[in-house]
Image (cartoon, rainbow, N blue to C red):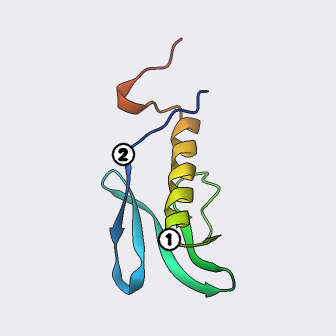
């Protein structure tokens, strides 16, 4: 299984109280929120079947949380054998 990049399918939308929604296309699949726990100033979680980030995960800041969420979603899409831009797997 190739580790292809699904660029442009994940976006972030502002929510209340400094939170952000993690969007996969038009569907909210996660959330990022600020924390006050030691060296971590943000955390994120994803609600995708079999996603390893289904519980809250710490991140250094919002930028790091966004980056980690994109990586996890890209890994999830590749594990589901979905290909970017309608590409098909070779049989």
Q: Residue furthest right?
A: 38
Q: Position of residue 1 (x, y in %)?
A: 61, 27
Residue 26: name its quadrant: bottom left
Q: Residue furthest top?
A: 91
The disc, 1 or 2, on the residue closer to the chain's N-terminal end is 2
What residue does disc 1 label? 62
Q: Secondary structure at mark 2?
A: loop
Left or right? Give the position of 57 relative to 63: right
Kindly report the distance in space between the C-alpha atoms of the residues bearing marks 1 and 2. Answer: 18 Å
| In the image, residue 11 above or below residue 44 | above
Left or right? Give the position of 85 relative to 39: left
| In the image, residue 88 above or below residue 22 | above
- Seen at 57% across and 58% down, the residue is 68
Q: Position of residue 53 (x, y in %)?
A: 61, 60
Q: Mark number for residue 8?
A: 2
- Seen at 69% across and 85% down, the residue is 38
Q: Position of residue 42 (x, y in %)?
A: 56, 76
């Amino acid at each position: 299984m190739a580790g292809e990049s699904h660029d442009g399918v994940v976006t972030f939308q502002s929510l209340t109280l400094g939170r952000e929604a993690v969007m996969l296309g038009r569907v909210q699949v996660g959330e990022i929120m600020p924390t006050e726990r030691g060296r971590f100033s943000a955390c994120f979680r994803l609600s995708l079947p079999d996603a390893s980030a289904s519980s809250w995960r710490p991140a250094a800041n919002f930028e790091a949380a966004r980056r980690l969420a994109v990586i996890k979603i890209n890994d999830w899409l590749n594990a589901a054998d979905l290909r970017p831009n309608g590409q098909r797997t070779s049989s």
